[in-house]
Amino acid sequence: MSNILLIDFGSTYTKLTAVDTETESILGTSQSYTTVESDIINGYENALSELRKQTGGIVFDKRIACSSAAGGLKMVAVGLVPELTSKAARLASLGAGAKVIKTYSYELTKSDLEEIDSSRPDICLLCGGTDGGNKEVIIHNAGMLAKSTGHFPIVYAGNRNAADECAEILASKQCIVCSNVMPRLGITDSAPVQKVIREIFLTQIVKAKGLSKAQDLVGGILMPTPSAVLAAMKLLSKGTEREDGIGDLVAVDLGGATTDVYSMCNGHPTNPMTTLRGLKEEYAKRTVEGDIGMRYSIKGILEASSPYEISTISGLPEDICLEKINHLAENTDELPSTEEDQNLDVALACIAVRTAVARHAGRIEEYYTPMGVSYVQTGKDLGSVETIIETGGALVRTGYAEKIGQYALYSPNDPMSLRPKKAKILTDRKYILAAMGLLSTEYPDVALHIMKKELV
Amino acid sequence: MEEKNNEKNVEKTTEMKPKKKIVIGVIGADVHAVGNAILNRAFLDAGFDVTNLGVLVPQEEFIQAAVEVGADAILVSSLYGQGEIDCTGMREKCDEAGLKGILLYAGGNLVVGKVPEEEIVARYRALGFDRAFGPGTDPSVDIACLRKDLHMDD
Ligand code: B12
């Protein structure tokens, strides 16, 4: 018998999942409120004694953890052209599980540098130029970053022909050179840079954030939480050597402050008359909407919609909706207690999911030519994705996961948005995705089986 | 982006100078793909580092690509008769994007109807293009001009 304890040190909750790898089952889950200030260890101990009530006094053979505590992995991304290397840098950082504070393009100015320094990133990703392409801007930007007062490591993933010069300019800083995120125009390659980011996270960031004690206690904080979720989604989609995954999918994690969207699919144009423009995005893509969330970012949901629409979906009068939204924006830990509040939360969740998935998905434009219509696609075509996974308290709690999930789909009101046409909605009721990503590092088959069982 | 071809040509042993970088594509809502494919091959064979954007390319995409790859020249094709409209403002946008003085060529069926070559060149020079080429120009002519303008034989 082999019992594994999977730990997610979150920003407000420490979540535990106990798994038996023999029976491939979840023995129990628990969570406890924590802040780093109140000592992350207390939160862990509280959650553990809660868990013991379900599992009894079992012995854990192994403990593995991920963390988004102490602000998560904060990064700034620097590139050249906004639609090209800046976007590639941003997507690579998000895919490494980072929170991207800001993305910069072209030459960094003095005030940009001041802004970067005061935002205190954990890592700065420096990109720009294809291999053999523009050197001037990245060399300028290396020069600016050399003057930074911060102590963050700089990961260089730009034009390889400027790498030596930039490394020299950045000699007084910790600068790690890896291969270009956009080696050729429109082609992204973020795996190498993500590997470097993960190593820095493991060896430096955990310590810098004062999580060393937690790390000692559990034996290792392996990755940022979003990176664990990404690993789980990749596994569920692709499967293992021994067993197939469930194929292309989209996952939405609706939180209080942000909404994360993951897509696992190539998303290439499906029609031969369609040309792909701009950056060719990768199979595994993560985006974060910082202005879309159920409480801290509730106003962003309102902005993405209208009082009229929220009223229509929730069945509440417009003025009541607005009043309640203002109230919730101030009282961010309030959960719905009445049926009205519940209906409002469902409506907000519908719009949040629609907005976040639409921003994540690609778009198509029509060109009329005398021989018919031609199309140009930017981003990923999620049209053929057949599974949508919902996670996050707000989605799971409402009990209307099916209804909310429909808002992730193609809509005739926005026909150019390449969202899934028809999909089965699965719900992560026990909130196990990050845990399964962690488990997959050693027991991919077990993690895959548990997800297939638990996501319904 | 399937037919868009960014492949690097096999290194020529004779010259050790870095290759000149050019961005090519067919501008606007134009889908004529054959000439573009021929030019791509011809420029690769002539030893250029070619970034081919294919058909249906807006001005912005030419410019963004040229900035990232550090292009020495942009070669715009237009075959369907809308070239003058599609090319208007391109030079100004290049200036705006920091590509001041970048070499700009246009070629294909640049205007509607039978118009003498000098007239076509004059119209495109007025739009800020360095050179314009009339219908049926052989790629060897374009290549010779590029070599001259980019001082490749100096
Ligand atoms: C095949 C073709 C089509 C096919 C294209 C298929 C495809 N996906 O490629 C289809 C049927 C789709 C088509 C559609 C149309 N076409 Co058409 N098409 C042709 C045709 C018969 C051949 C084009 C071709 O492939 N030529 C062979 C290649 C190798 O030559 P090229 O394209 O000229 O390119 C060479 C040179 O021009 C030069 N060059 C090109 N670009 C550049 C750039 C630079 C910088 C330089 C230096 C040189 C250079 O080098 C190239 C290689 O040698 C021509 C007529 C003709 N004989 O040219 C008409 C023609 C181009 N089409 C024409 C028209 C009007 C259209 C339509 C608008 C309407 C219609 N009648 O259907 C639509 C437009 C569609 C759209 N939105 O783009 C006109 C254009 C008229 C004008 N400009 O004044 C032409 C000239 C026919 C005509 N005589 O009326 N077309």
Image (cartoon, coloured by chain):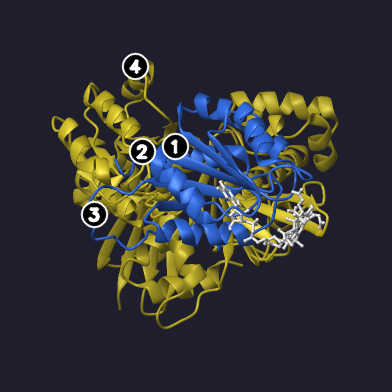
Chain colours: A yellow, B blue
Q: Are marks 2 and 1 on the same chain?
A: no
Q: CA distance from mark 4 to mark 3?
A: 39 Å
Do marks 4 and 3 share a chain?
Answer: yes
Determine which residue is flagged by label 1: B67
Circle nearer the viewer, 2 or 4:
2
Q: Which residue lies under the disc numbered 4?
A: A110
Can you give x and y, in whole percent of width and height, for residue B26 in the image?
62, 49
Q: Are marks 3 and 1 on the same chain?
A: no
Label 3's element? loop
In front: label 2 or label 3? 2
Mark 2 sits near ligand 1, with its Cβ under 8 Å away: no
- Residue under disc 2 on the same chain as residue under disc 4: yes
Indicate which quadrant contains ligand 1: bottom right
Vertical placement of residue B147 versus A446, above or below = above
Quarter of the figure that contains the C terminus of chain B = top left
Q: Secondary structure at mark 4?
A: helix
Residue type at mark 3? Gly
| Residue beneath the point at 52% across and 37% down | B104
What amino acid type should be assigned to the residue bearing mark 2? Asn
Q: CA distance from mark 1 to mark 4?
A: 22 Å
Contact between marks 2 and 1 (CB within 8 A): the answer is yes
Determine if marks 2 and 3 fall on one subunit.
yes
Mark 2 vs mark 3, CA separation in Å? 41 Å
Q: Secondary structure at mark 2?
A: loop
Q: Secondary structure at mark 1?
A: helix
Q: Position of residue A293 (x, y in %)?
A: 59, 37
Disc marking residue A220:
3
Where residue B63 appears, as percent x and y from the top left, is 52, 37
- Image quarter (top left, top right, bottom left or bottom right) of the N terminus of chain B: bottom right
